[in-house]
């Protein structure tokens, strides 16, 4: 059994700030908050607090693309160059939607994590306050060259997922965040989830703190998320999401299965589907995110019928609790 007291003790020991939730068969086994959403004013996090999830956003962008696939607007094998002739140079002409979904397109990456290691100190040429939707990022791609030919290798790509957001806007003629709210979040039962502006956050939203826990992240991230990161959500919304996704209430049953299939092996244990990490033996599926002021991990374990979500408002703040809880589970 899950040892609740050991989880609480570990959270206190590592000075965890955020929310941890464990659902079993859709019933909450553990759902508790720790630390502060406003450190200076000692305003505590609550189980209902909204947190940024950084790259956890990528699966949701992938699902937005999936909605368009289900509607026949595009297909896995649609070449990006067929969607618009302006998409050249920074991505291989033969790169397809599936290549983008699986980080194998070779697209130029504005935030290449193989080169940039410090998320607390990363900036781009465009001021953060001007980046409100994926289309605002397009100047970062113009004139750049692709990293490699499509399908050559797996290379985790923030740029690829921003570009998928650009494609959603191009194909639908709608603002990315509005499309996502109506076509993904609401069908998934994610009532409080959204791409909120850093200078206009809803009530009970956690400030994001750098690792020193003194400075917030407001000058280190785009003013509003889009494509590769920046979504805000709650642990309850995540639980609703996993249930909706796995029950094929967002995508068709056929496409849901296609998204969960292993597309690339990353190492001897883990692989990647479409926007989602997984164990190669299908024992676990997960989305993760780390950025300035954000630490996030959410996992579905089909055999145990468990959903584990860890949301932290400190850079990489989820890591130690994730390792402790997974070690505890694997040792049972």
Image (spheres, rainbow, N blue to C red):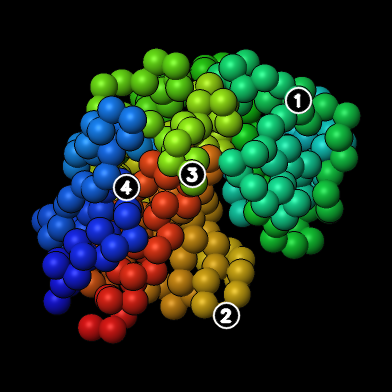
Q: CA distance from mark 4 to mark 1?
A: 32 Å
- Specify which label sits upstream in the sequence, 3 or 4: 4
Label 1 element class: loop
- Alpha carbon of mark 3 to alpha carbon of mark 4: how far? 13 Å
Mark 4 closeness class: few <14, some 14–19, many ≥20 residues within 10 Å: many
Q: Would you say the residues marked 3 and 2 are in contact, meaning their CB atoms lie under 8 Å apart?
A: no
Asked whether the beta carbons under mark 3 and mark 1 sit within 8 Å of each other, the answer is no
Residue in view at x 46 percent, y 72 percent: 279
Give the total number of marks visible in the rendering: 4
* Foreground label between 2 and 1: 1
Q: Badge 3 local density, few (<14 within 10 Å), some, or many (20+)?
A: few
Which residue in the protein does label 1 denote? 125
Name the residue rendered at 33%, 34% in the picture: 39
Q: Residues within 10 Å of mark 1 (few under 14, many from 20)?
A: few
Instruction: Give residue 4's position: percent from left, percent from top.
Output: 14, 66
Q: Say whether residue 169 is visible.
A: no
Nearer mark to the viewer, of 4 and 1 = 4
Q: Where in the figure is residue 323, as x and y percent of width and height?
A: 39, 69
Q: Secondary structure at mark 3?
A: loop
Q: What is the spatial separation of the Cα atoms under label 3 and label 1, in whole angstroms?
A: 26 Å
Residue under pointer 2: 268
Residue 276 at least partly seen? yes
Q: Are marks 2 and 4 in contact (CB under 8 Å)?
A: no
**Which numbered disc, 4 or 1, marks the residue that appears first in the sequence?**
4
Q: Name the residue that disc number 3 marks.
A: 212
Judged left or right of residue 234, residue 146 is right
Residue receiving disc 4:
17
User: Residue placed farthest to the bottom in the image?
Assistant: 331
Q: Is residue 97 above or below residue 224?
A: below
Residue shown at the point (24%, 38%) measured from the top left = 45
């Amino acid at each position: 059994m899950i040892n609740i007291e050991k989880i609480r003790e570990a959270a206190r020991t590592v000075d965890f700030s955020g929310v941890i939730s464990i659902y079993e068969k859709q019933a909450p086994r553990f759902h508790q908050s720790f630390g502060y959403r406003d450190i200076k004013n000692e305003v505590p996090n609550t189980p209902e607090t909204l947190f940024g999830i950084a790259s956890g956003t990528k699966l949701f962008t992938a699902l937005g693309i999936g909605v368009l696939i289900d509607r026949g607007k595009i297909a896995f094998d649609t070449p990006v160059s067929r969607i618009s002739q302006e998409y050249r140079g920074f991505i291989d002409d033969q790169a397809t939607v599936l290549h983008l979904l699986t980080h194998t397109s070779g697209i130029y990456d504005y935030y290449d994590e193989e080169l940039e290691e410090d998320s607390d100190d990363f900036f781009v040429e465009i001021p953060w306050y001007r980046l409100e939707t994926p289309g605002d990022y397009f100047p970062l791609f113009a004139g750049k060259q692709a990293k490699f030919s499509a399908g050559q290798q797996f290379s985790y790509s923030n740029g690829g997922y921003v570009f998928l957001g650009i494609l959603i806007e191009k194909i639908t003629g709608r603002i990315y965040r509005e499309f996502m709210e109506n076509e993904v979040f609401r069908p998934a039962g994610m009532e409080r989830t959204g791409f909120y502006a850093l200078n206009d956050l809803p009530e009970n939203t956690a400030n994001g703190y750098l690792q020193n826990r003194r400075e917030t992240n407001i000058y280190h991230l785009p003013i509003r998320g889009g494509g590769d990161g920046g979504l805000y959500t709650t642990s309850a919304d995540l639980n609703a999401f996993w249930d909706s996704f796995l029950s094929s209430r967002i995508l068709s049953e056929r496409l849901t299965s296609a998204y969960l299939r292993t597309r690339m092996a990353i190492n001897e244990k883990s692989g990647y589907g479409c926007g989602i990490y997984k164990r190669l033996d299908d024992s676990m599926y997960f989305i993760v995110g780390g950025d300035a002021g954000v630490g996030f991990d959410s996992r579905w374990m089909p055999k145990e019928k468990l959903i584990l979500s860890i949301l932290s408002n400190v850079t990489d703040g989820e890591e130690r609790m994730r390792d402790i809880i997974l070690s505890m589970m694997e040792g049972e």
